[in-house]
Amino acid sequence: MKKTLFLLLAFSVATISCFTGCKKDNGSSTDYIRGKVDGVAFEANSNMWATPGRPGDKIISFRGDWPGGSIRFYLDGQGSNITTGTYDFTTGIVRNAVVYENNDGYSAGYFCGGFGPCTYYGSGKIIILNISKKHVRGTFEFVTNVSGATGVPKTVSNGEFYMNRD
């Protein structure tokens, strides 16, 4: 009898703890972008933004800031809707990420626009795990160019995001 009461009490405490502290994996209503820059963890918690969901998601961009840094992403579907799958940074397709630390910017991917020629920096990828009109969720990793200001590149790893789009 004591053993049954103990198990029932343990199950009740675990259930209550989960309801008050467990985190939803899917369908979250809270935006996040998190990962590691050169092995140091970050989590964007302000200025969170993503392109709104609409029919024909041919371009998606999203961003977020944290104290001392920020991160921005841009994916161009090249005329096709962006769906679940892997989007490698490659020459000729505008897909990129920029991470800022203490006002220094570090770029990865292919960039076009402005007055100069298109340019490719570093390497990386974004994996879209789920996309709808209401949210986009996935993972990312990239290695940036060598910054002219600091003389070093940045490695961004273990990245994951969930962004509301409405």
Image: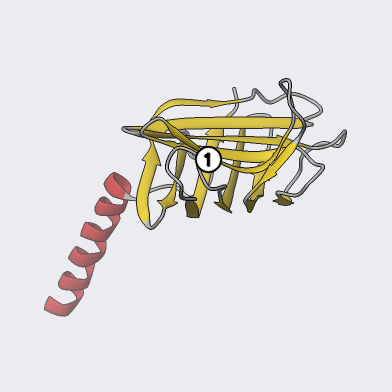
Q: Is residue 124 above or below residue 147?
A: below
- Left/right placement of residue 93 relative to residue 53 reads right
Mark 1 surroundings within 10 Å by alpha-carbon count, few (fewer than 14), some (14 through 19), many (20 or more): many
Color encoding of the figure:
secondary structure
Is any atom of residue 1 visible in this view?
no
Q: Which residue is mark 1?
A: 162
Q: Nearer the viewer, residue 23 or 117?
A: 117
Is any atom of residue 62 visible in this view?
yes
Q: Residue at x 57, y 52 (%)?
A: 142
Identity, as a three-letter code, of the amino acid under mark 1: Tyr
Q: Looking at this rendering, what residue extends furthest in the right direction?
A: 79
Q: Is residue 55 above or below residue 1?
A: above
Q: Position of residue 88 (x, y in %)?
A: 72, 52
Total numbered labels placed on residues in the image: 1
- Left/right placement of residue 139 relative to residue 3 reads right
Q: Determine which quarter of the picture holds residue 114.
A: top right
Q: Is residue 51 above or below residue 34?
A: above
Q: Residue at x 70, y 49 (%)?
A: 89
Image quadrant occupied by the N terminus = bottom left
Q: Nearer the viewer, residue 97 or 1?
A: 97
Q: Position of residue 10 (x, y in %)?
A: 20, 66
Q: Position of residue 157 (x, y in %)?
A: 49, 56
Element at label 1: strand
Image quadrant occupied by the C terminus = top right
Q: Residue at x 68, y 26 (%)?
A: 53
Q: Position of residue 75 (x, y in %)?
A: 70, 37
Q: Nearer the viewer, residue 38 or 147?
A: 147
